[in-house]
Image (cartoon, rainbow, N blue to C red):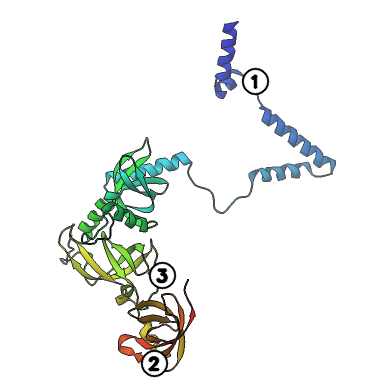
Amino acid sequence: MAKKILNEQENINQPTEMIEEQNPNVELTKMEELENKEDANADFAAESEGANTDETVEKKKQLKLGVLKIRLDDSLPEDDEFETMWNELISIYRGRKTLPVTLTGIEKTQTQGYVVVTYYKTQRILVPITEMMIYLDEERDDGYTDTERLLRACNSMLGSEIDVIIKGMDKENESIVASRKDAMNRKRERFYLTPLSDGLPQVRVGRIVEARIVTTTQALARVEIFGVETILTATQLSWDWIANVSEKYHVGDTIDVLVTEMTGSTIDDLRIKADVRSITRNLSKENLSKCTVQSKYIGEVTNVRNGVAYIRLKIGVNAIAHTNYDRRSPARGDIVSFVVIRINPEYSNVSGIITKIIKQSV
């Protein structure tokens, strides 16, 4: 009896293909039988209504085919997508190539301390915070430790695109560790320290190059130019006076800059200065023709220093106000009315008086 039960259990566990081979006379599954019954019922219903049976069958075939779409879904199954992506990463790793990734998070791990989380497609890639190569001013004393300052810098870079070089891979755990420092050094060597046929490197003084914006604040933007980071102030970014740089320029964007100064001859001591204003039109100067003395315009206060208000007029002109007739003090972001007293073509601006603060910034 026990032997009989065991044999029945083995038959249950056999694959479907083997069961079908052992029962060659079984031609229809229960599902097929059910479909045939439904088809028969449909044909009967059609005939009872006087419809053409052949036409009904043809319509059913068309319905089963479905609508043919213009854009066919040619995506790979998930397993194939993962294998394809992983093989791409293996090729990049073996070739020691730089890989562009997006900075999406910061985590603290038990083994590597703080790490930056990045992604290539759907693959997570970790970059130890010590491998981010963020320049810290050693003379700056702001009360923070180097780790805290690194964390603050990385936090401001969330959403930016960075280049990394893969240092290690573990497919079983789907784990990849990479270094931004190695990628930055690779680019420095190639674009700053390797001369072309004319004896000069690709990045040189006087050349317009593309830069990545890696962080922004109210007053400035930090950009990465082929492996070297530099600061661009609001006045270096635009002829227009800007109240808030982070509202006009965003992390992850790219901008064209003019290289104005380079120092250093090794990977470690390279420094660069750049400018955006020099390669853009000075619309503020061109718009001076729209102004007349004693005329009144509205504008936004972009900055206040030592009692002097700097204003961007709505007609596209920079303005300076040494006097304010409103009982309230102007602040950055306020909308004010302004009377032109003097036009200054040599400085591309006008000077005058704030007559009223129309709307204070929150």
Local secondary structure at mark 2: strand
> How far apart, in angstroms, are the residues tagged by discs 2 and 3?
30 Å
Q: Residue at x 67, y 45 (%)?
A: 62
The correct choice, above or below, for 322 with respect to 139 in the image is below
Q: Are discs 2 and 1 less than 8 Å apart at CB? A: no
Q: Is residue 44 left or right of residue 100?
A: right
Amino acid beneath label 1? Asn
Measured Cα–Cα span from mark 3 to mark 1: 75 Å
Q: Earlier in the sequence, mark 3 or mark 1?
A: 1
122 displayed left or right of 207: right
Q: Nearer the viewer, mark 2 or mark 3?
A: 2
Which residue is label 2 attached to?
341
| Residue type at the position of mark 2 | Ile
Q: Is residue 97 visible?
A: no
Numbered disc 3: secondary structure: helix
- Report which quarter residue 228 is drawn in: bottom left
Q: Which residue is mark 3?
A: 248
Foreground residue, 197 or 325?
325
Q: Residues within 10 Å of mark 1 (few under 14, many from 20)?
A: few
Question: What is the quadrant of residue 19 in the picture?
Answer: top right
Alpha-carbon span between mark 2 and mark 1? 103 Å
Residue toward you, 22 or 184:
184
Tag 1, which secondary structure? loop
Residue at which label 1 appears: 25
